[in-house]
Image (cartoon, helix red, strand yellow):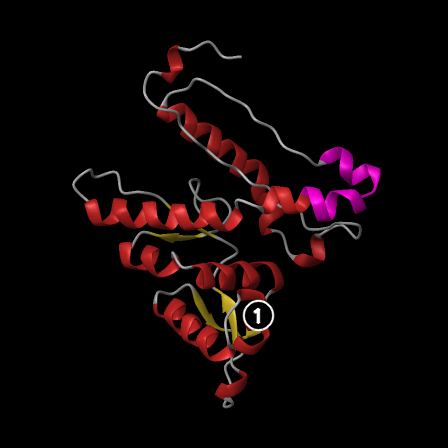
Amino acid sequence: MTSHNPLGDIEITDPQAMRALAHPVRLAILDHLHRHGPATATELAPDVGATPSVTSWHLRHLAGFGLVRDSEPGPDRRRRRWEAVARGFRFEAPRDPADEEGRAAARVLSQQMFLRYADVPARWAAEVEPELDQAWRGQAGLANTRVVVSAEELAAIEEGIERVLAPYVTRDAAERPADGRGVRLMRYVLPEAAGEQARPTP
């Protein structure tokens, strides 16, 4: 972990790795492994929408880019269990404007991630929120905050949020509270088009 990556995510910089991950089944595989831990291709298949053999192929492809690995190496390859190499992953478009391949790959992966998670809030509101008790319901919801900042200030805001989250993300399972439950914190950081900053903040 570094000051710029306090959550310990794997950092994806290779455009080929970004393109490899920009696939609905592969994103679903990583999502499942992050949330539920090690699994076989057969266990993953119903959740990721592919047959066990196709899921196995995608797992090997992800392993080739260092995103998943064997969880329990053993002689029986038919029961091969896989795990994610890190709690999460991160990537960003290259800063070099001449790196068109990297910028295009980052854009494709971003688009696939937006598509995958676009309906998560609506499904949560329809299926989960009605069943929550008041204590959890009161802490749930969304915020839509607009600020006018420089790129450097936005980076500082993101780093501050991650510093707050890091102790909860990286602590061992034994340190979690007995009444704890999984909470998905979704952050969309969406800089507006040039000229938008001139408009008054509502």
Residue drawn at the location 47% of the way across and 73% of the way down: 55
Q: Nearer the viewer, residue 37 or 144?
A: 144
Q: Quadrant of residue 95?
A: top left
Q: Tag 1's secondary structure?
A: loop
Residue drawn at the location 46% of the way across and 63% of the way down: 25
Residue ID for mark 1: 38
Q: Nearer the viewer, residue 60 or 176?
A: 60
Relative to 121, is 78 on the left or the right? Answer: left
Q: Residues within 10 Å of mark 1 (few under 14, many from 20)?
A: many
Residue drawn at the location 37% of the way across and 70% of the way down: 61
Instruction: Tell me residue 43's x, y (percent).
Output: 59, 74
Report if residue 21 lies within the magenta region: no
Q: Amino acid at mark 1?
A: Pro
Q: Is residue 122 above or below residue 84?
A: above
Instruction: Tell me residue 137's x, y (percent).
Output: 77, 37
Instruction: Tell me residue 122's x, y (percent).
Output: 63, 42
Prevailing secondary structure of the magenta residues: helix
Q: Nearer the viewer, residue 32 or 12?
A: 32
Instruction: Tell me residue 130's x, y (percent).
Output: 78, 43
Q: Is residue 122 above or below residue 155?
A: below
Relative to 185, is 106 on the left or the right? Answer: left
Q: Nearer the viewer, residue 73 or 37?
A: 37
Q: Which residues are magenta?
A: 125-139
Report if residue 132 lies within the magenta region: yes
Relative to 21, is 81 on the left or the right? Answer: right
Residue drawn at the location 34% of the way across and 49% of the way down: 108
